[in-house]
Amino acid sequence: MDYQTARSFLINQGIASEKNADTFLVRLQQGKAPVPGQVTNMLLALKIVFEGLRSSPTIDRELSYSLYLLSFESRHQFEAGRIAGVNWPPLLDEDLKRIETAVKSIFSGVWS
């Protein structure tokens, strides 16, 4: 996966569209677990985007918004689902923490 592919993948997973009903956030909003491999691909894409932006002083708005949604809104949907009684996969909470850490790393410029 190259930078452009990783960037596009993260934007598609974070910003809902009519084209793809299986995006990460849409599935969480519906109380559904991520598609198998979806989180793994997101974490790989986050690492590639981090490497691609390491020397860049700026991040474009569309990518920034998507990263924000993937880190903040996914946690919000997870907690809302938990309160509503959704039986999430056991590792989803840890996966969300990994996503949050990777997004923080992209914004800070230091991989954690």
Image (cartoon, rainbow, N blue to C red):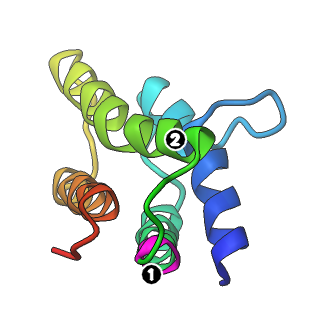
The amino acid type of the residue labelled 2 equals: Ser
Q: What residue range appears in magenta?
A: 50-54
In this rendering, is residue 47 above or below 87? Answer: below
Q: Name the chief secondary structure element in magenta.
A: helix
Instruction: Answer left or right for 78 relative to 26.
Output: left
- Give the percent coordinates (x, y) of residue 1: 66, 84
- Give the percent coordinates (x, y) of residue 60: 58, 47
- State the residue position of label 1: 51
- Give the percent coordinates (x, y) of residue 11: 62, 48
Instruction: Answer left or right for 40 relative to 5.
Output: left
What residue lies at 46% left-to-right and 77% top-to-bottom? 44
- What secondary structure is found at the residue carrying circle 2? helix
In the image, is residue 22 part of the stretch drawn in magenta?
A: no
Query: Is 4 in front, or is 79?
Result: 4
- What secondary structure is found at the residue carrying circle 1? helix
- State the residue position of label 2: 66
Instruction: Answer left or right for 112 relative to 73.
Output: left
Where residue 30 is drawn, which disc sits there?
none
The local crowd at label 2, few if under 14, some if 14 to 19, many if 20 or more residues have their Cα within 10 Å, is many
What residue lies at 52% left-to-right and 63% top-to-bottom? 38
Query: Is 90 in front, or is 21?
Result: 21
Q: Could you give the CA–CA distance between mark 1 and mark 2, rounded to whole angstroms?
A: 17 Å
Residue that lies at the very extreme toward the front in this rendered image = 57
The amino acid type of the residue labelled 1 equals: Glu
Quadrant of the drawing holding the C terminus: bottom left
What residue lies at 49% left-to-right and 25% top-to-bottom? 30
